[in-house]
Amino acid sequence: MGIDFNWQTEDQITPPVLPGKSSNPLAWLVVAVIAVCLAVAIWFGARYWLEHRDDDLKGELQAVLDLEQQAAQSGDGELFLSLQTDDPAWIAAQLLPRNQSFNQAEREVTRARQSEGEAWANVRWRENGDSWQRIVFFRWDGSKWRRSAGSDTYWGETKRYRYDWGVLILPASDIDWRTPISRFVADNVPANTPHLTLILETDDAPALEYATPGQVGEVRLPSPRFWGLDESGSPGASFWSAMAAHLNPPTTTLRFVVPDAVAFRYQGLAQTFTQTYLPGDYTIEIIPLGSLPADPRAWLPQVDGAKLTLTESLIVGGYVRDLTDMAQGDAQFEQGDFYEQIWQAAWWQDRMWMVPANAELNVIFYSREAFRAAGLPEPQAGWTWDDLTAAANTLSQPLSDGDHFWGIMDTTGDLVWGYGLSWESDCLQGPCLPDLNGERRQAALSWYAANVGQALPDVSSLTDEERELARLRWLMLQQAAMWVSSPVNYEVELSRMPLGVVTFPLSLFQATAGGVDAGITPLHVSGFIISQDSPHPRLMWEWLRYLSYTSADKLRTIPARPSVAAQNIFWCRLPGQLNAALCAALPLARAIRIGEENWLTWQQLQDPTTPVSSRPPWFQRPTY
């Protein structure tokens, strides 16, 4: 028998028929229309969202600028700082005159963009009847926008271009201006300059010529976008003027102001420096301080620099140049070769504003005869403020002619400062840098109020000249047992009476701990500054560096550099007991810092209700 198998293989299986594609054109048209409409809707929606997001950003940034303008116009430094990033260099740049004008102007944000925690805005304002625009940057701090120095994304790559005159370095965002900038440099650079590097910076730093005229070097300027562009978007006149001034300064005379008593010595130093270091026909003119108005704000814009005691009002007014970058970039300027307590006086808001020159450290002179007659032991190293107060009250007594013999006399104000700095001090090894906080200031004012008119005379209502006359009268009549004085007066006072010298007293903790011979004494530091308006900042810096290694001031002021003190055998030339007092006092001395000149003033001693920490207004350059 046979079986017939009819096998069907897989290859022979007929696949199922799939549904055919629609050939209806209307359906396709509907799908296409829906897709296009959806795309258009998404595009318009995205555009609407972006526009409104940018509008919201513009409003937020505009609010910051409006509040900043309010702070700048009113001189409210605290409010102004609250709107800035914590960048000391950026804060210092806002004190430049051109930035002061910009910050006080009414400004409008015309465009704004945001990217990864930062934002930039195109800002328009009017000045002297003209319309200008510039770039302004912001950073998000987690809760609000703050103005900042620059951007991580805005500028693009750094570009370098070589020309006959040298090299131009600028960000990619500024390359459209490279040709007019190059032509301007070629037309304005001195003919004897062999090579120049011009760098356009991407942060708003002070302009600076690193070149000594006629030599190889650099000129650094902020981008034209920081100076202000005209209505066509081209660099404005202020940028071209600044570049011309730094390429080819308008004058070759550096004007430098010094106290009258040392003008002759500085003239000799200026002559040596000119012959040795200055190029071509550059000279230094020494101007005696006494020939100028009493207020430095009246003459600082007309000079290149000065030797003075720097105050906060000169900095926040925009009269003094920030020296930090020049000092830190100069290997020949030995920052470590300064007494630390004197070096502290050069700084404000974490920036360096002067080169310390010297410091005056007052001591206490006393009449040995007065202590002998009263049966009191003479003051000794390591005495306390309680010892001073008790001795002063014991020695103080009315005289038969209605006058008064004072236990201690102070026409410098240093006693109150010394008490405040030493109050509850636990510093046993210098430098001692206590903060003169409100509690210490109040303690000092209370000590003064408890003893003025009893142990020491009230000279708070007198002028400086009247205080000096009163001091001379009391000393001539020998109507004080102790008095605060400059070491320079030692020989004069010694010629009048048997004289003792002692340091400022110690706190109770210091005296109990032992090992300390002097309390915390206030240091009065003066130094060299560069005017914000000087067209020669680099040459002025070289002059200041040179001066910091010399000593042209009166003999009894302490040179800021130990090397200069050693070179001039300063310590060895001091009389014995004066040497002992100054050597004991200096390690624990504490400089009166920039800004503290407004504390514990004679006005506050006269009227305790006067604010003890009044601060000068910012951005207030008066017109003289």
Image (cartoon, grey):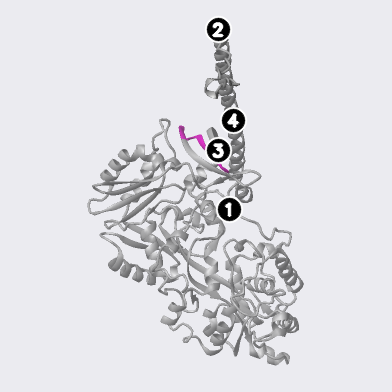
Q: Which residues are magenta?
A: 113-132
Q: Which quadrant holds residue 257?
A: bottom left
Lower sequence index among marks 2 and 1? 2
SS at circle 4: helix
For residue 617, side relative to residue 290 (left or right):
right
Q: Mark 4: which amino acid?
A: Asp
Element assignment for label 2 = loop
Nearer mark to the viewer, of 2 and 1: 2
- Closest to the observer: 576 or 142? 142
* Disc 4 crowd, CA 10 A, few/some/many (<14, 14-19, 20+): some
Q: Quadrant of the N terminus?
A: top right
Check disc 2 and give the amino acid type.
Asn
Q: Secondary structure at mark 1?
A: loop
Residue 425, how many percent across, how many down?
69, 75
- Which is nearer the N-term, disc 4 or disc 3? 4
Q: Amino acid at mark 3?
A: Gln
Q: CA distance from mark 1 to mark 4?
A: 27 Å
SS for callout 3: strand
Q: According to the image, label 4 marks what residue?
A: 55
What residue do we see at 39% from left, 48% from top?
A: 221
Foreground pick, 189 / 381: 189
Magenta: main secondary structure: strand
Q: Is residue 112 above or below residue 303?
A: above
Q: Residue at x 44, y 63 (%)?
A: 327
